């Protein structure tokens, strides 16, 4: 168990070089170093600037629709017969997921650095949509890289991005999913670094991205903490969030780091089962390595090649994870578990049926784990689940599994 | 003196510039690599850059991505690459060999193990694209102890204070990336390169090799007039890809390209 002093240090991470203990850092080719330093300086200056904060808060309130509600899922809780489950409703944000908190922030940074062009990578398409949305609003040219496998399974979001004026570039290299989209976005950035702002969608990548994405997403945890105090009169016993790259989870967790009694549980994609090797759970079954600009837990083979991942949810289908999660795992402050495809699908259907809330397949992993935990806990205990996105984009996938053509 | 220093010193005394071809180890088949390395040396190459195949080569364009994929189809691992260098060394004890790649395969092997095995195999230098000096403290120490030069990149975007810092961390030679972009991308502008090399030389006595965008005799010759070394990769790898179906022809065909560049550079 980490001590109080450990947690105080953890709250202040990363260090100046972007390290979270042994993780994080800036592992990129030389061409990008200057751009990352410029971004870091811009960010550090603006994040402390009250005028920037006011602009960010105003956008979150009037454009995104914050604060998002903390909803007591009473029917689900009473049916499970244990802890009370509260859902942090990030699905109710404009564009339907937590991703927009970050793209609003990064778009403001792009505006302040004067770059006319933004690029993004996307898995499920939620970050792509959120990037295309802020680009449309600010009149920026926007290119979104997306693995061709994800283009197929997230057709609705692809069309949404096109309607928003973004160009979606299908990526055919490698495993044709999120990691390959990120490779391709990095290649674009190296080539167009003078006029391009790269909006990374998760709390991973080279410093300062893991830090700034966390800071922009921490609104989730700050609100949830206060809402729980207001509604239940106390802090929750556990936080549960899905982890692909881990931006929604770190956004929920970070404001609670020093609340040592609040358990933090990240739920990775178990795919067909961690034991099958067909999963996307680097914290559960990987080891430290270096990919996409940071040292973190990764899925790579014994020769250091990145392994193909599998998850029913495109947004979790990634072989790495944000470095702060790797740090919190090794510190013993957060726990990481895996939920398989079928359990997530079951949670997707169940929450839809008993609460009338259709979660994204990514968020369904968190719901599934909360459904496992709740019956083992007392009725006066509280679990806050980050409902990071809505499930409309996944109807096609679920219908396909049901053998129905929509 | 390291083989790399020796090589540049000798070239300088002859008034020549280094020709440094890059090929990906194991592309299109592990059997091709060592004969290809010898053929490149026979054609006039001074230093060989041997790519370590990686599943996610983020700084490379499609040509080298596909080369990595072909090599990985045969399961070419870092250990196999080291074996190839050892085999090459049986017949060639003078030509420097630099391994070029991404950090994760080395990270997974362990820096100390890699340093020991690479040194034993006869590797002279290592260039890890995604390991800037800021993250390379322990790596640098271990490579230095093993007598392996750590070669760093400089880019058009590298500012002056950083040029100094990067040059101080590296040894052997400096690799100047001539264009903003991935390997095999746009044309280089020799005048701009020359200007940047003047700045770089204010901070280091190390030889400077220039890579990215050199695709024919003319660009090789033009770069050789301003740089100490000419690094050529994608055009060779494209030829390898073209002949992937008739592997016996690869060493000769690829060496024909470097032979012609050599001639153009020595004119």
Image (cartoon, rainbow, N blue to C red):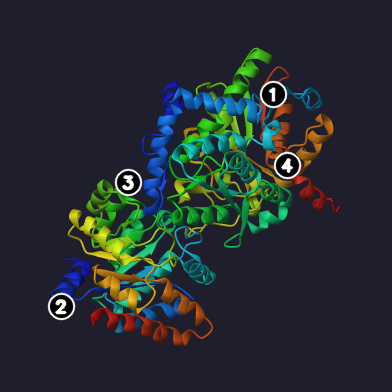
Front position in the image: A269 or A148: A148
Residue for point 57% across, 35% down = A104
**Image coords of residue B258 (percent x, y):** 34, 80
- Mark 4, residue position: A344
- Mark 2, residue position: B14
- Mark 3, residue position: B134
Q: Residue B207: give its label.
A: none
Are tags 3 and 4 found on a single chain?
no
Residue for point 62% across, 53% down = A167
The answer for which chain carries disc 1 is A
Q: Residues within 10 Å of mark 4 (few under 14, many from 20)?
A: many
Disc 1 from disc 4: Cα separation: 23 Å
The answer for which chain carries disc 2 is B
Res B192 seen here? yes
| Closer to the eye: label 3 or 1 | 1
Disc 3 from disc 4: Cα separation: 41 Å
Residue for point 56% across, 29% down = A253
Front position in the image: B50 or A373: B50
The answer to whether residue A7 is above or below residue A367 is above
- Mark 1, residue position: A69
Most extreme residue toward the left, as rendered? B13
Question: Which element carries disc 2, helix, strand or loop?
Answer: helix
Mark earlier in primary sequence (1, 4): 1
| Closer to the eye: label 3 or 4 | 3
């Amino acid at each position: 168990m980490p001590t109080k002093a450990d947690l105080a240090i953890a709250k202040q991470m990363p260090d100046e070089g972007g390290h979270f203990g042994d993780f994080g850092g800036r592992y990129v080719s030389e061409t990008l170093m200057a751009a990352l330093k410029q971004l870091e300086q811009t960010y550090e200056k603006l994040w402390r600037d009250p005028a920037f904060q006011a602009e960010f808060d105003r956008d979150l309130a009037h454009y995104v629709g914050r604060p998002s509600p903390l909803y007591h899922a009473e029917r689900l809780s009473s049916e499970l017969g244990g802890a009370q489950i509260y859902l942090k409703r990030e699905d109710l944000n404009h564009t339907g997921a937590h991703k927009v908190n970050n793209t609003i922030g990064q778009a403001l940074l792009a505006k302040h650095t004067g770059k006319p062009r933004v690029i993004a990578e996307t898995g499920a398409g939620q970050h792509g949509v959120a990037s295309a949305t802020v680009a449309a609003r600010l009149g920026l040219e926007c290119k979104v890289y997306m693995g061709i496998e994800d283009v197929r399974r997230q057709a609705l979001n692809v069309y949404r991005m096109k309607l928003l004026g973004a160009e979606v570039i299908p990526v055919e290299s490698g495993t044709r999913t999120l990691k390959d989209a990120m490779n391709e976005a990095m290649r674009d950035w190296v080539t167009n670094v003078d006029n391009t702002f790269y909006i990374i969608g998760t709390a991973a990548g080279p410093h300062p991205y893991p830090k700034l994405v966390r800071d922009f997403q921490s609104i989730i945890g700050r609100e949830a903490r206060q809402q729980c105090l207001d509604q239940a009169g106390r802090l929750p016993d556990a936080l549960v969030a899905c982890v692909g790259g881990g931006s929604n989870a770190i956004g929920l967790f970070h404001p609670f780091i020093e609340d040592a009694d609040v358990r933090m549980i990240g739920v990775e994609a178990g795919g067909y089962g961690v034991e099958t090797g067909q999963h996307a759970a680097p914290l559960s079954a990987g080891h430290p390595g270096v990919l996409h600009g940071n040292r973190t837990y990764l899925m790579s083979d014994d020769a250091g090649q990145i392994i193909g991942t599998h998850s029913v949810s495109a947004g979790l289908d990634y072989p790495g994870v944000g470095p702060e999660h790797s740090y919190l795992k090794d510190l013993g402050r957060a726990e990481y578990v895996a939920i398989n495809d079928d359990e997530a699908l079951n949670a997707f259907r169940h929450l839809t049926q008993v609460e009338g809330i259709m979660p994204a397949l990514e968020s369904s992993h968190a719901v599934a784990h909360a459904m496992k935990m709740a019956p083992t806990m007392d009725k006066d205990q509280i679990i806050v689940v980050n409902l990071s996105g809505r499930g409309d984009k996944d109807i096609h996938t679920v219908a396909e599994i049901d053998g129905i053509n929509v | 003196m390291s083989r790399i220093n020796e090589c540049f010193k000798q070239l300088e005394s002859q008034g020549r510039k280094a020709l440094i071809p890059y090929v990906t180890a194991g592309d299109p088949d592990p059997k091709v690599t060592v004969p290809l390395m010898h053929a490149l040396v026979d054609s006039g190459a001074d230093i060989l850059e041997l790519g370590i195949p990686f599943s996610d080569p983020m700084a490379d364009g499609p040509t080298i991505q596909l080369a990595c994929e072909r090599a990985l189809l045969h399961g070419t691992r870092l250990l196999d690459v080291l074996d190839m260098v050892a085999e090459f060394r049986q017949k060639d004890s003078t030509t420097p060999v630099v391994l070029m790649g991404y950090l994760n395969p080395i990270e997974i092997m362990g820096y100390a193990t890699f340093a020991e095995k690479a040194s034993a195999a006869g590797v002279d230098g290592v260039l890890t694209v995604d390991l800037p000096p800021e993250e390379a403290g322990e790596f640098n120490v271990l490579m230095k102890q093993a007598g392996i030069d750590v070669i760093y990149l400089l880019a058009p975007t590298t500012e002056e204070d950083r040029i100094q810092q990067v040059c101080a961390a590296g040894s052997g030679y400096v690799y100047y990336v001539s264009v903003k972009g991935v390997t095999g991308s746009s044309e280089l502008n020799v005048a701009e390169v020359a200007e940047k090399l003047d700045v770089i030389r204010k901070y280091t006595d190390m030889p400077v090799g220039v890579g990215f965008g050199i695709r024919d005799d003319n660009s090789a010759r033009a770069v050789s007039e301003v740089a100490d070394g000419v690094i050529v990769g994608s055009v060779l790898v494209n030829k390898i890809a073209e002949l992937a179906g008739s592997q016996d022809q690869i060493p000769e065909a690829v060496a024909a390209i470097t032979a012609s560049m050599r001639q153009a550079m020595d004119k």
